[in-house]
Image (cartoon, helix red, strand yellow):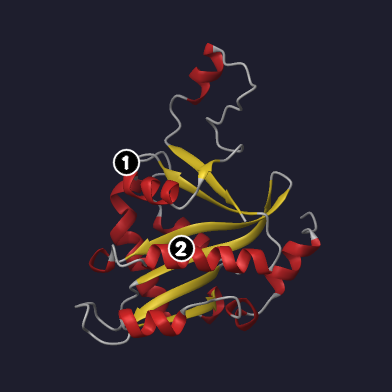
Amino acid sequence: MPRQPILVQRANQASAAQLAASITGQEELKASQHVDVALLTASELPQELREAVFALWERNMRTLYVESSFGWDPTSKERELFHTTSRFIVVCPTDNASMISQSDVIAYTMFRFDREDGQNVVYCYELQVHEKAQRMGLGKYLMQQLASIGRTWHMKKIMLTCLKANSAAKRFYITSGFELDPTSPEYISSDEEIDEGQIDETVNVDYEILSVLL
């Protein structure tokens, strides 16, 4: 396995507490939304929280995955989610005012530090918000924390993969400043010639890779 670039290596070796030092607005969010925010590594997730994280992903994404080229493979997804390099920012309710059980996860993002196309990046694998907690600014808050962490640890951009069928997510990411990344299968630069063969090769791709510079 090739050695990781030094900045990615340092970020991956950082403790949850070191990464959490970049998180902002926790007290304000706790007061206004009655939630707690925690940054945890995959190994630090208690079993109850781990199950809640996976349940929220399944609740939000199962239909989209079943109908996508990725297919429905919960075992593979569980391995990806809880990989040793996965990091989580988890939002949990502090009371039942939201009508969500306190054992539930109200929202979370799972991310890793990686190297993509010669750049050090924060790769956002998941950004999930409970259906009863949407339009409360939690997705925006989590994305802001990824940006803060990425800048602190000298990453160049945030990247993510978005299914084309997930139109609500795509709108959110575009509103948040994301654009089609040059590594996306259908990306064509402004000075690149387009030919029919190139278009035909990508016509069946049902996802896009998006990114935003930090």
Give the spatial CA distance, label 2 vs label 1.
Answer: 19 Å
Residue 127 in view (yes/no): yes
**Lateral position of residue 114 relative to residue 31, left or right:** right
Determine whether 177 is above or below 198 in the image. below
Residue 77 position (above or below residue 53) = above
Q: Badge 2: few (under 14), some or many (20 or more) residues near its Cα, within 10 Å?
A: few
Q: Position of residue 141 (x, y in %)?
A: 43, 68
**Numbered label attached to residue 67:** 1
Amino acid under disc 2: Glu
Q: Earlier in the sequence, mark 2 or mark 1?
A: 1
- Rendering coords of residue 95 (x, y %): 26, 87
The quadrant the C terminus occupies is bottom right
**Residue found 56% across the figure and 31% down from its top:** 187
Mark 1 neighbour class, 10 Å CA radius: few under 14, some 14 to 19, many 20 or more: few
What numbered label is drawn on residue 78? 2
Q: Quadrant of the N terminus?
A: bottom right
**Where is residue 183, by image quadrant?**
top right
Q: Tell me where residue 45 appears, x and y as whole percent.
A: 48, 79
